[in-house]
Image: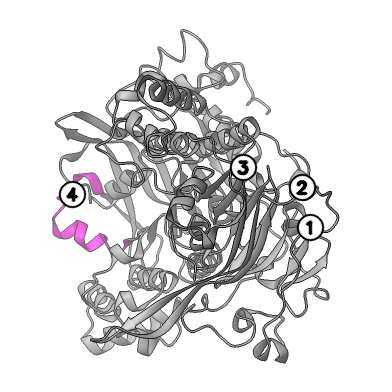
Amino acid sequence: MPENQVLVEIKDLHTYFFLAEGVVRAVDGVDLVIKRRQTLGVVGESGCGKSITSLSLLRLIPPPGRITQGEILYYKPSAGDNGSVDVINITALNPNGREIRDIRGNQISMVFQEPMTAMSPVRTVGQQIIEAIMLHQKVNKAEARKRAIEMLARVKMPKPERTIDDYPFQLSGGMRQRAVIAMALSCHPHLLIADEPTTALDVTTEAQILDLMRSLQNELGMAIMYITHNLGVVAEMAEEVAVMYLGKVVEQTDVKTIFLEPLHPYTQGLLSSIPRLDESIMRGEKRRRLQMIKGMVPDPYTRLKGCPFHPRCPKVIGDVCDQVEPASIWVRPGHMVRCHLYAEAVKSGPAPSH
Amino acid sequence: MPDLMPQSSPASSEPLLVVEGLTKYFPIRRGFFKRVVGQVKAVDHVDFYVQEGETLGLVGESGCGKTTTGRCILRAIEPTDGRILFRDPKLGRVDICKLDKEQIRLVRRNIRMIFQDPYASLNPRMTLLDIVGAPLRAMGLAHGKELEDRVAQMLQLVGLRPEYMRRYPHAFSGGQRQRIGLARALAPYPKFVVCDEPVSALDVSVQAQILNLLEDLQEQMGLTYLFVAHDLSVVAHISDRVAVMYVGKIVELASTAELFSSPKHPYTEALLSAIPLPDPRPREKRVLLTGEVANPANPPSGCYFHPRCSYAEEICKTHEPEFDEVTPGHYVKCHFGRELSLTGVVRMPDR
């Protein structure tokens, strides 16, 4: 089944930042699999390493940051779509070399959070999209402009023939984000990394952009790695969800399971700490207190022994969680959790029912 | 203008704050002589009241005037027109718009504000003692040892250790900084707090801690909140009543339960439908708005929402609707507020 073919495989990725104050282990052993045409949601709070994972994938880690361990395998579908793939180890490439530049912005492209900083303010929207097209595709300027206008029309930009000559500051936030998406998709990438693309937008605009991304994904058949802290957006966009905490993926499974039967105490804590529009609000009942995760994310320089979540975990097992780091446990095919609570359950047979 | 006073309430529950026809236009100046060439109608004849002890949520998209409304209440921004009646424990019932400099200082002991960005709202060169003590010192409420004791008490109240008093803000995380801002706001024991997006900059797990703290303090200190935010789930959680703003005007105001289950304004319906729900099951129906928020310097004719409204008719283009009370306590600014049957939030089962 070509739909389920693996596109990118991240294996035991470590990206560290070597600062005067100490070493920040931003990404500390991440394993992820992105399948073709699929949307993988990556959720977590600030500092959990979700953005650094995606930047590592594009080899955009600025010094003093460095990928210290692990590999990122890109299964590049060969031209002609005959099903064969070339395996490229992205971590082995020169970050300034020709090969990665051929992938970056072309086969794997990115949409950033703040559309104003993602575009140059002194060049028109058109110039920036045309540049991307001419860099990666062998076309002349007139043809590139034609394709840029086509792409702007695809992202439902009103009057694309005119907007192409506008500067980013002349566009509203939502329109700017459409332009950034048009730029990212102009070379028909196999993978689109979307790093909080709607966080800076209003809800009604956010709904428009999410709708647009979904329909473009259907049209162009790309995979999306959707990074966000908003669990509502994940529920709407993703098929598969990875929850990150302190540089590690603590739980990964399909979107239904993560919301309805989460296993990791951190996932459970996150889900119960968001205010919900549920029945009791509709009935106007006295509101209940939100459940909280106690404490806060530790500062980035400290390295905790054992499970990184143990000081905040309500289900902490003494002498185990603070000593031994939990390994990835597959409670059933397609559901991974890194937590000691489930170690026994797996050894003794079937997956625990929740 | 409709009568916004609650009709069926006993005499004792006169609202703490009544806002009538509040208006703020920012002039647009151009050219050498800085001639006024237009007005940005940031807040345009807004009416609401807030009962003592309740939380009124104020929601809307960026640029709708919700922050300007909050700031006008403290006269941090000078309103262009309107009345803001506040029941001050010392001064009695006063119109904040008419107070002189000395009186406004007195009122600001009772009306305080917490800000969105905990990194920008604390002076990095001041210790917590200076920050939290500043309002007490400025209002002459405490000095020396007494001031220190009061700051220690405030820090404890918001869940920080009093020993931290001599530290600087850089040593604290976003959530802790928001607690410091809260301690500063509450130090003079105010009656009314304008919360301007107090949890928008925080992570989900910290957001829950601050929301719970705000509710606990409301109960302990008998506070009244105006809660300005754009996150509708947060507003629904914390508010007793909710007002929805669009391009400088309140388009709907109702109890939280009513507004979210049976909205009467098409804009509210679209807003509710746009909320990303943390539930992977597919939704029944989604109203996607087309177009963009109107420009408050050059708003459309009639109802400001008509170019984006799927229910708009001829009258919407020509006449501005009244702010009408369609059922008791439920106000809508729509020509068809009584007729339309709109969809609220798709119901989710209780956890």
Tell me the SS state at disc 4.
Answer: loop
B166 or A122: nearer the eye? B166
> The residue under label 1 is which amino acid type?
Pro
Q: Name the residue under label 3.
A: B89
Tell me the SS state at disc 1.
Answer: loop
Q: Name the residue under label 2.
A: B13
* Marks 2 and 3 share the same chain: yes
* Marks 1 and 4 share the same chain: no
Q: Distance between the residues labelled 2 and 4?
A: 71 Å
Mark 3 residue crowding within 10 angstroms, few (<14) / some (14–19) / many (20+) = few
Tell me the SS state at disc 3.
Answer: loop
Q: Name the residue under label 1.
A: B6
Q: Distance between the residues labelled 2 and 3?
A: 14 Å
Sooner in the amino-acid sequence: mark 1 or mark 2 = 1
Mark 1 residue crowding within 10 angstroms, few (<14) / some (14–19) / many (20+) = some
**Chain identifier of the residue bearing label 2 in the image:** B
Q: In which quarter of the image is residue A139?
A: bottom left
**Chain identifier of the residue bearing label 3 in the image:** B
**Residue range highlighted in magenta:** A89-108
Can I make out residue A183 in this image? yes
